[in-house]
């Protein structure tokens, strides 16, 4: 169990599963209930890490065969959301580490970036020296429909 210092953060039950076990979910939930009885005012959550290639076994136990998420519209949407959040979290963590607190206005602009824009910003961050430079980068107009000139 992971007990954070702050009382407003959840208690976390962590299970590491290295071989197939049909009872892992029931056992984890039972542990969560037992902990909730000891700490009634705290939120309790559970996480299971699987240390074996058990995806097929888990799919069969839960739902049967699952489609490849990359081949479904919903799966593609989830992957796109995950990629966007990953870029956003990485940028905010970098800025906070290098420059301290990130103003809400800057956080809002970063949240609106597309994954491609976030990638370009991350490349820019490697060379920028101040949060003001980042703010100016975020304020610049987006290059929509810009075409390269060709000699003709």
Image (cartoon, rainbow, N blue to C red):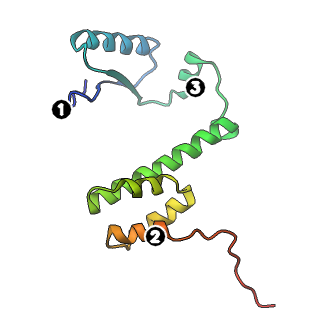
Residue, x 31% and y 21% (percent of image)? 43
* Residue furthest out toward the bottom: 151
Mark 2 vs mark 3: which is more N-terminal? Answer: 3
Residue, x 25% and y 9% (percent of image)? 37
Mark 1 vs mark 3: which is more N-terminal? Answer: 1
Q: Is mark 1 on a helix, strand or loop?
A: loop
Q: What element carries label 3?
A: helix
Residue indicated by mark 1: 5
Mark 2 vs mark 1: which is more N-terminal? Answer: 1
Above or below: residue 118 compared with residue 15: below
Q: Can residue 17 be seen in this view?
A: no
Above or below: residue 116 compared with residue 6: below
3D distance between C-alphas at marks 2 and 3: 45 Å
* Residue furthest out toward the right: 152
Place of residue 7 in the rendered image (x, y in percent of width and height, measured from the top left): 21, 27
**Quadrant hosting residue 15:** top left
Q: Residues within 10 Å of mark 3 (few under 14, many from 20)?
A: few
Mark 2, mark 3: which one is toward the viewer?
Answer: 2
Q: Is residue 150 visible?
A: yes
Residue 35 is labelled as: none
Residue indicated by mark 3: 56
Residue, x 33% and y 56% (percent of image)? 102
Report the side of 53 relative to 132 (left or right). Answer: right
Q: In what quadrant of the picture does the C terminus appear?
A: bottom right
Residue 137 is labelled as: 2
3D distance between C-alphas at marks 1 and 3: 37 Å
Mark 2, mark 1: which one is toward the viewer?
Answer: 2
3D distance between C-alphas at marks 2 and 1: 38 Å
Place of residue 30 in the rendered image (x, y in percent of width and height, measured from the top left): 35, 9
Place of residue 151 in the rendered image (x, y in percent of width and height, measured from the top left): 77, 90
Q: In what quadrant of the picture does the N terminus appear?
A: top left
* Residue furthest out toward the left: 5
């Amino acid at each position: 169990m992971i007990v954070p210092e702050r009382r407003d953060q959840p208690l976390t039950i962590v299970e590491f599963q290295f071989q197939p076990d049909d009872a892992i979910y029931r056992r984890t939930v039972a542990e969560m209930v037992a902990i909730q009885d000891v700490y009634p005012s705290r939120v309790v959550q559970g996480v299971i890490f699987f240390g074996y290639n058990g995806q097929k076994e888990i799919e069969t136990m839960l739902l049967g065969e699952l489609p490849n998420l990359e081949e479904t519209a919903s799966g593609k949407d989830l992957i796109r959301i995950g990629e966007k959040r990953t870029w956003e979290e990485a940028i905010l963590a970098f800025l906070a580490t290098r420059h301290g607190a990130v103003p809400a206005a800057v956080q809002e602009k970063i949240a609106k970036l597309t994954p491609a824009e976030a990638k370009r910003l991350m490349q820019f961050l490697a060379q920028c020296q101040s949060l003001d430079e980042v703010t100016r980068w975020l304020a610049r107009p987006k290059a929509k429909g810009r075409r390269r000139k060709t000699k003709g």
